[in-house]
């Protein structure tokens, strides 16, 4: 009884996290004008898919996991299994669509707006759902996934209190290759290309911009100083962040779904009569479900605009809790003083600007109360040559 209670609590928390996280993503896009773009349509589609999974599939999966019996009859059992396969497939294929969208945005930024059009995004989403239905409802309702060719959970030999997902070799190989292994290979290749392009851009930035580390005073107060860090540090930080983000995305996808599809393929090749009786099958199945709870974090919380929208929603829903989480004014001021002015030499506040032209370094400090003063360092060789030309 204690183990069942603990399992019920864990599964309930996973379902609540899946539903709540994906609802938050949808509300963030609806409430924030800056998030209403074509790219985020794919993220909203992913959130809707995972939300439907949390509402229509996970409660019945938890009931079947805890109770061990199916009390709703064979017709609803086949509908439940079809919905499960369809929504999981749609979630995986939507992840693939998001990776393709980001690949186009990185490789062809100037042509991206002309390539990714609303009607093309709609066609992509329609294709995702068509493939998902084709590998779920059609074969299960027609009996193409069973060994003897009959519809599963029907007939005199089927148990009324069991909900079996029968598997045969052709269905398992087609489903696993089409909905997981091929998308996995495609996603890995796409993200590796994105990372390669990001590194190439970082190297070009380093080669075309000089490195500068300048310390100066940006305010009238002599106690306040701000440090401008080097271009190399900026590029390294940006590349590290991109690497961590891509590793989190592809790592979570592989960790959650790879064990399930490996066991799914092995049991299908062996044509196991009832995979649900295998203890490991339930574990890897719920691990795959967990990916739907992680998607709002990976594709939402890692984005600055989504984080801002999350904060606004939480501030409206839980104002007392939000005020208690805010740091004191002293801590905020200290953080602001320690914050870097910029990560690049050509992005500084209005009061302090660093200009780099050819081999000259011009440091300008603009103050509204005093006249502008300029310090100019010229190349001695160029100056001497200009002096000789004048003579």
Image (cartoon, rainbow, N blue to C red):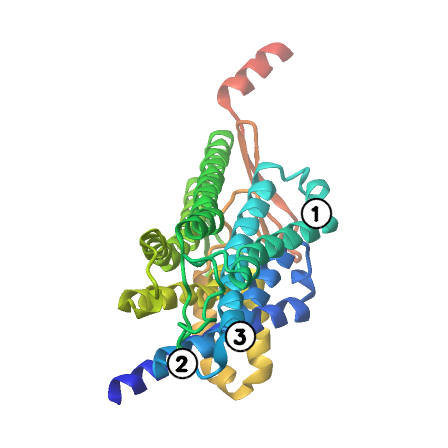
**Residue under numbered circle 3:** 75
Mark carried by residue 120: 1
- Element type where label 2 sits in the image: loop
Which numbered disc, 3 or 1, marks the residue closer to the eye? 3
Q: Which of pointers 3 and 1 lies earlier in the amino acid sequence? A: 3
Q: Is residue 123 left or right of residue 225?
A: right
Q: Is residue 291 left or right of residue 137?
A: left
Which numbered disc, 2 or 1, marks the residue closer to the eye? 2
Q: Are marks 3 and 1 in contact (CB under 8 Å)?
A: no
Residue 357 vs residue 169, the one in the foreground: 169
Mark carried by residue 277: none
Q: Is residue 147 left or right of residue 372?
A: left
Q: Badge 1: how crowded within 10 Å, few (<14), some, or many (20+)? A: few
Residue 134 vs residue 240, the one in the foreground: 134
Q: Badge 3: how crowded within 10 Å, few (<14), some, or many (20+)? A: few
Mark 3–mark 1 Cα distance, whole angstroms, equals 36 Å
- The quadrant in which the C terminus is found is top right
Residue 54 horizontal/vertical position (percent): 50, 73
Q: Badge 2: how crowded within 10 Å, few (<14), some, or many (20+)? A: some
Q: Residue at x 43, y 63 (%)?
A: 291
Residue 234 horizontal/vertical position (percent): 45, 45
Tell which residue pokes out farthest to the left in this image: 2
- Residue 221 seen: no
Residue 43 horizontal/vertical position (percent): 58, 59
Residue 130 horizontal/vertical position (percent): 62, 54
Q: Are marks 2 and 3 in contact (CB under 8 Å)?
A: no
Residue 151 vs residue 100, the one in the foreground: 151
Q: Which of pointers 2 and 3 lies earlier in the amino acid sequence? A: 3
Mark carried by residue 161: 2
Residue 345 vs residue 251, the one in the foreground: 251
Q: Which of pointers 2 and 1 lies earlier in the amino acid sequence? A: 1
Q: Residue at x 73, y 51 (%)?
A: 118
């Amino acid at each position: 009884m204690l183990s069942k209670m603990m399992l019920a609590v864990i599964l309930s928390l996973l379902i609540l996290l899946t539903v709540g996280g994906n609802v938050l993503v949808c509300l963030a896009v609806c409430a924030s004008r800056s998030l209403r773009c074509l790219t985020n349509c794919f993220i909203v589609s992913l959130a809707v898919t995972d939300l439907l999974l949390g509402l229509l599939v996970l409660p019945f999966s938890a009931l079947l996991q805890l109770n061990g019996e199916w009390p709703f009859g064979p017709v609803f059992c086949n509908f439940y299994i079809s919905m499960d396969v369809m929504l999981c497939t749609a979630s995986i294929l939507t992840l693939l669509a998001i990776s393709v969208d980001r690949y186009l945005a990185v490789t062809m930024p100037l042509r991206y707006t002309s390539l990714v059009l609303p009607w093309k995004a709609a066609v992509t989403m329609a294709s995702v759902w068509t493939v998902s239905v084709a590998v779920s409802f059609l074969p299960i309702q027609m009996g193409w996934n069973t060994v003897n060719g009959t519809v599963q959970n029907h007939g005199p030999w089927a148990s009324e209190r069991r909900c079996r997902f029968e598997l045969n070799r052709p269905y398992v190989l087609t489903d696993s290759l089409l909905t997981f292994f091929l998308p996995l290979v495609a996603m890995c290749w796409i993200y590796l290309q994105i990372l390669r392009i990001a590194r190439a851009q970082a190297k070009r930035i380093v080669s075309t911009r000089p490195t500068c580390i300048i310390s100066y005073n940006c305010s009238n107060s002599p106690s306040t100083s701000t440090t401008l860090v080097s271009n190399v540090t900026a590029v390294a930080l940006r590349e590290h962040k991109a690497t961590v983000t891509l590793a989190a995305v592809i790592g979570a996808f592989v960790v959650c779904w790879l064990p399930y599809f490996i066991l799914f393929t092995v049991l299908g090749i062996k044509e196991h009569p009832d995979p649900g009786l295998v203890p490991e099958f339930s574990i890897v199945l719920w691990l795959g479900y967990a990916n739907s709870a992680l998607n709002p974090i990976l594709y939402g919380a890692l984005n600055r605009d989504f984080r801002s929208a999350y904060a606004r929603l939480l501030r409206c829903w839980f104002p007392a809790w939000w005020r208690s989480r805010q740091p004191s004014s002293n801590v905020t001021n200290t953080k602001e003083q320690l914050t870097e002015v910029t990560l690049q030499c050509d992005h500084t506040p209005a009061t302090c600007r660093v200009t780099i032209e050819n081999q000259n370094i011009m440091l300008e400090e603009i103050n509204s109360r005093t006249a502008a003063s300029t310090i100019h360092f010229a190349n001695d060789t160029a100056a001497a040559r200009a002096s000789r030309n004048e003579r």
